[in-house]
Every structure is written in C-alpha cells, then in structure tokens.
C-alpha cells in the first residue's frame, strides 16, 4: 500500500506475542508499517521468557524489514534516558508515532520539539486496524498455533481482551464470543504528544489523541441521513 506511515515500536510492545503479532501482521493490510531499532530488539530480548522465540530469529525467519539505525539522542530535555535512544531512532527514521507501554517516560518538551506522539498499543490498534485487518491477523495467528487458544475466537477472547480491551470491544460483534476480563493494572496514561493517532497530522493541543477531523461526531452532530 503506497503512502504508508512509519510507526516505531518500543521494546515493551515487542515482547507480548499477541501484541507483536497484531502490530506486525496488521500492518500488512493497514495504512501503516512498523519499525524498531537494534537497541530496542536487544532490550526486548533481554526481557523475553527464556523459552520464547527470540525476536531477532523471528525477524530473520520471516524476512521482516523493520530495523532502523540507532541514533545518538542529543539535546533531549525531559525523556527518561533509557527511552531517549528510542525517540532519537524513531525521529531519524521518519516515524511520527511511537507505540509504547511507557507513555510517562517520554517528555512533553522532547515530543513537542520533534513533533511526535507516543501512544499505547490498545489505543493505536483500536484506532488503526480495520475489521478485515483484525480478522486476518487472528486467522494468521491461529494458523501458526500448536497450543491453545488455536482459533481466532479463542485468541480474541482469551488473549486480546485481557491485554487490549478496547481493541477486543471494538470488534466484539465481529467474532461474537464472550470476552475475558481485562487484566488488572490498566495504564493510567495512554497518549502523549502532538500528532493525531489516526491521521498523524499535527495537533495544536493535547486534550485528545485524535484531531478534530478524526474524532467521531457526537450523535447530535452527525449528518442527517
């Protein structure tokens, strides 16, 4: 798909296999493509379960062309030092969004100077995946499984719903199965920055992750049928 935007994946979203699969496989039929740095890949692998397939091995096996150069994080003000390399690599690669579970570690001053946003995976995926893309990903994940859950419905209910509740709820009628309870410890902050999560245009303020053009109309604002 021409004109796809580039989205940088932080190390912490590469570790959970279902989140990683939704982002990487979902990008194939969506309006974005994903990338990460060698620094991020190594960081993710340090935190993977010892029996999990290494991300670098998966990247080589499936031919994922995702690695972007590592960059020196110069002149950053308020981003956590451990996340500065991610922000620097993402910006240098041309990504406007970083998908991460550590929203609070990215400073507003740095995001403003680079005109970027950071967004939680649940918010990003529920905003950017279409119904067809979501079903295609679940089918692909189920086809490669040798352990339960091994059906799209099972993955949707048992793995997506606890970890990515907004995404599961968006497509609850598509698969029509009861959803598992969301995991405890929901993220307190799911967005920070100056780019719309949907269209990636610059936004003048921080009161919403979607710009005015991308926000759903309220019922009384909808156009008459």
Image (tube, rainbow, N blue to C red):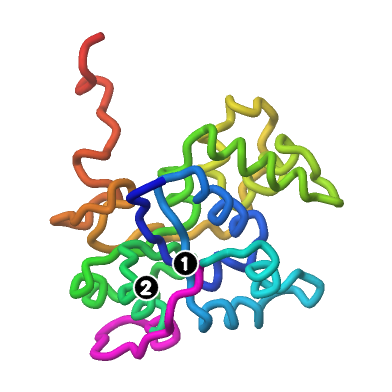
Observer-nearest residue: 117 or 92?
92
Q: How many marks?
A: 2
Could you tell which of marks 1 and 2 lies nearer the N-terminus?
1
Q: Position of residue 1 (x, y in %)?
A: 41, 46
Residue drawn at x 48%, y 60% as measured from the top left: 187
Are the residues at dot 1 and dot 2 in contact (C-beta closer than 8 Å)? yes
The picture quadrant where one finds residue 69 is bottom left
Q: Residue at x 37, y 83 (%)?
A: 84
Residue ID at (44%, 50%): 123
The residue at the far left in this view is 204
Q: Is residue 79 magenta?
A: yes
Q: Is residue 77 above or below residue 186?
A: below
Question: Dot 2: within a 10 Å radius of its alpha carbon, few (fewer than 14), some, or many (20 or more) residues?
Answer: many
Residue 35, relative to residue 205: is it above or below?
Answer: below
Residue appearing at x 71%, y 37% in the figure: 152
Residue 128 vertical position relative to residue 107 in the rendered view, above or below? above
- Give the percent coordinates (x, y) of residue 205: 16, 56
Q: Nearer the viewer, residue 129 or 164?
A: 129
Measured Cα–Cα span from mark 1 to mark 2: 8 Å
Which mark, by number, is residue 162?
A: none
Determine the secondary structure under disc 1: strand
Rendered location of residue 103, percent (x, y): 40, 67
Which is more toward the observer, 201 or 107?
Answer: 201
Q: Any mark on residue 35, and which?
A: 1
Tag 2, which secondary structure?
helix
In the image, the segment drawn in magenta is: 66-84
Label 1: few (<14), some (14–19) or many (≥20) C-alpha neighbours in 10 Å: many
Q: Is residue 39 magenta?
A: no
* 19 sits to left or right of 116: right
Q: Which mark is residue 90?
A: 2
**Quarter of the image with the C terminus in it:** top left
Overall secondary structure of the magenta section: loop
């Amino acid at each position: 798909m021409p004109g796809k935007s580039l989205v940088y994946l932080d190390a912490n979203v590469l570790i959970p296999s279902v989140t990683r699969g939704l982002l990487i496989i979902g990008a194939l039929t969506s309006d974005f493509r994903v990338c990460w740095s060698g620094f991020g890949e190594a960081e993710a692998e340090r935190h993977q379960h010892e029996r999990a397939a290494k991300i670098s091995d998966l990247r080589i096996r499936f031919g994922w062309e995702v690695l972007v150069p590592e960059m020196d994080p110069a002149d950053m003000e308020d981003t956590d030092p451990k996340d500065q390399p991610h922000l620097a690599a993402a910006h240098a690669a041309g990504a406007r969004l970083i998908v991460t579970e550590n929203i609070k570690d990215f400073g507003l001053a740095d995001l403003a100077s680079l005109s970027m946003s950071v967004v939680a995976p649940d918010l990003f995926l529920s905003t950017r995946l279409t119904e067809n893309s979501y079903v295609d990903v679940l089918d692909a994940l189920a086809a490669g499984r040798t352990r339960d859950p091994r059906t799209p419905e099972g993955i949707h209910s048992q793995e997506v719903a606890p970890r990515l509740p907004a995404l599961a709820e968006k497509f609850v009628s598509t698969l029509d199965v009861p959803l598992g309870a969301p995991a405890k410890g929901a993220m307190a902050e799911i967005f920070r920055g100056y780019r719309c999560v949907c269209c990636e245009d610059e936004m003048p303020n921080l009161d919403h992750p979607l710009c005015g053009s991308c926000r759903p109309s309220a019922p009384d604002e909808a156009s008459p049928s």
